[in-house]
Image: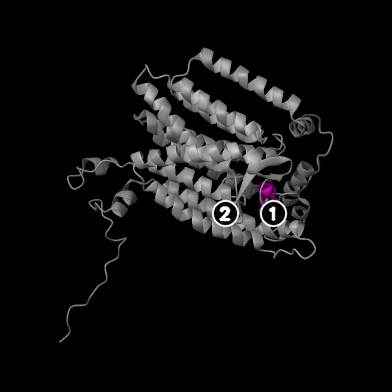
């Protein structure tokens, strides 16, 4: 006699809409399309770093210090494997715990940012990194998403209680960060922090007069940086006049031109060997050389799709905190991509900013995973779940 077959339950198959387990709640409320697009970006980044790794290894090898062709690819793969669970874990947090993470992280990384001029490692004339256990971390990268959520919370408090001077408090917090970044100096990150805060403040009802005043203050600040910080002066002068040492951008443009529409093919690029930072700042040029302008346009379209996707989901958001936080996080993500690609195309002066999820870098990857994890947490919602009799007692 043949007994009934024993069928092992598939945990994915059990994820019905009535599933009240933490995994079930997460699965049916997460924006799975957004998660998929982020995962695709990570995969593209691994391919791009694999293409750029031999050139970077060749450039940074010397004497007894020889790096393997795939040295930077292996490191990037490690960062992705660490970052992906971080992103998924953060995306499962409730609003309360996500805010607690942001507040604690903001305090920690502002403290580390203040210590950078004293204990930081110097590279290319700037102190931006702190050595921890054999690794270098960049506090400003981690501070970005956490600071955005913190200022969103402050602005939301002001929305709920008009007697709270939330905009002034958040502006003071921004001013402290700006002073710390200028000391490194890191003008690119300074501008990014300021631009994201401006978007949040405008959404929170900043007056036209205040906007004009802040824009004027920003112009004065950038002008002061141009006049007082030598490397900022040289970068802007090279961008505006085309004079001086334009080696970096010239090689980037050569790589993009060499790729044409469809590229030279994976591993076949020659101009990347002359790029100063082929795996980080100028990885977009490597993509253009080996995979062509079509691939560059597709990558840019993916960044745009992510920004548009989040923007559409925020159009009917009624919670001020979720609106300010999500808008700030996606603005940071989009602006960072625009800045990196703009530098590679000689549309913006060099800023040393990574291309999100594409450029090599541990601090950048983990910080982006935290930021996008927070964004996924804040955009979690599903109208069916909220009215389901099976999960009616659950709140996001």
Question: In the shown orientation, is residue 156 left or right of residue 201?
Answer: left
Residue, disc 1:
263
The chief SS type of the magenta part is helix
The furthest residue to the left: 1
- Which residue does the image show at 63% across and 55% down from the upper left? 48
Residue 219 placement: quadrant = top right
Specify the quadrant that holds the N terminus. Answer: bottom left
In the depicted view, which residue is nearer to us: 170 or 92?
170
Question: In the shown orientation, is residue 198 left or right of residue 320?
Answer: right
Residue 336 appears anywhere in the view: no
Mark whose residue sits in front, 2 or 1: 2
Q: Give the structural element (helix, strand or loop) at label 2.
A: helix
Residue 284 appears anywhere in the view: yes
Marks 2/1: CA distance?
15 Å
Q: Which stretch did the figure color magenta?
A: 282-291
Residue 104 drawn above or below residue 237:
below
Instruction: From the top left corner, tell me how far across and down residue 218 is, in percent.
Output: 62, 22
Instruction: From the top left corner, tell me how far across and down residue 309 is, in percent.
Output: 45, 39
Which colour style is shown? one colour
The circle on residue 44 is 2
The furthest residue to the bottom: 1
In the depicted view, which residue is nearer to us: 12 or 53?
53
């Amino acid at each position: 006699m043949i007994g009934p077959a024993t069928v092992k339950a598939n945990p994915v198959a059990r994820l019905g809409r009535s599933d009240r387990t933490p995994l079930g709640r997460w699965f049916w409320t997460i924006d799975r399309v957004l998660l998929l697009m982020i995962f695709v970006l990570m995969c593209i980044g691994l391919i791009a770093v694999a293409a750029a790794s031999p050139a970077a290894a060749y450039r940074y090898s010397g004497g007894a210090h020889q790096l393997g062709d795939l040295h930077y690819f292996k490191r990037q793969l490690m960062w992705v494997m660490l970052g992906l669970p971080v992103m998924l874990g953060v995306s499962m947090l409730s609003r309360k715990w996500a805010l607690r993470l942001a507040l604690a992280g903001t305090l920690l990384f502002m403290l580390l940012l203040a210590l950078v001029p004293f204990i930081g490692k110097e590279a290319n004339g700037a102190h931006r990194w702190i050595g921890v256990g054999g690794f270098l971390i960049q506090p400003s990268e981690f501070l970005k998403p956490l600071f955005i959520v913190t200022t969103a919370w402050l602005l939301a408090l002001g929305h709920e209680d008009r007697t709270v001077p939330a905009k002034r408090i958040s502006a003071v917090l921004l001013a402290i960060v700006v002073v710390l970044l200028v000391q490194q100096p890191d003008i690119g990150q300074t501008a990014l922090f300021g631009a994201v805060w401006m978007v949040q403040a405008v959404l929170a009802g900043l007056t036209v007069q205040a906007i004009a005043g802040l824009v004027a203050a920003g112009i004065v600040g950038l002008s002061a940086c141009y006049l007082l910080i030598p490397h900022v002066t040289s970068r802007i002068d090279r961008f505006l006049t085309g004079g001086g040492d334009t080696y970096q951008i010239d090689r980037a443009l050569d790589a993009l031109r060499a790729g044409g529409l469809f590229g030279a093919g994976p591993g076949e690029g020659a101009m990347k060997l002359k790029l100063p930072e082929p795996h980080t700042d100028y990885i977009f040029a490597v993509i253009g050389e080996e995979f062509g302008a079509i691939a560059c346009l597709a990558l840019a379209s993916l960044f745009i799709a992510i920004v548009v996707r989040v923007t559409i989901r925020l159009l009917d958001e009624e919670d001020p905190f979720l609106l300010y936080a999500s808008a700030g996080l996606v603005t940071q993500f989009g602006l960072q991509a625009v800045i990196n690609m703009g530098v590679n195309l000689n549309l913006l002066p060099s800023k040393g900013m990574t291309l999100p999820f594409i450029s090599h870098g541990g601090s950048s990857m983990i910080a982006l995973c935290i930021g996008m994890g927070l964004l996924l947490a804040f955009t979690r919602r599903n109208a069916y779940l909220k009215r389901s009799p099976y999960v009616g007692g659950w709140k996001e």
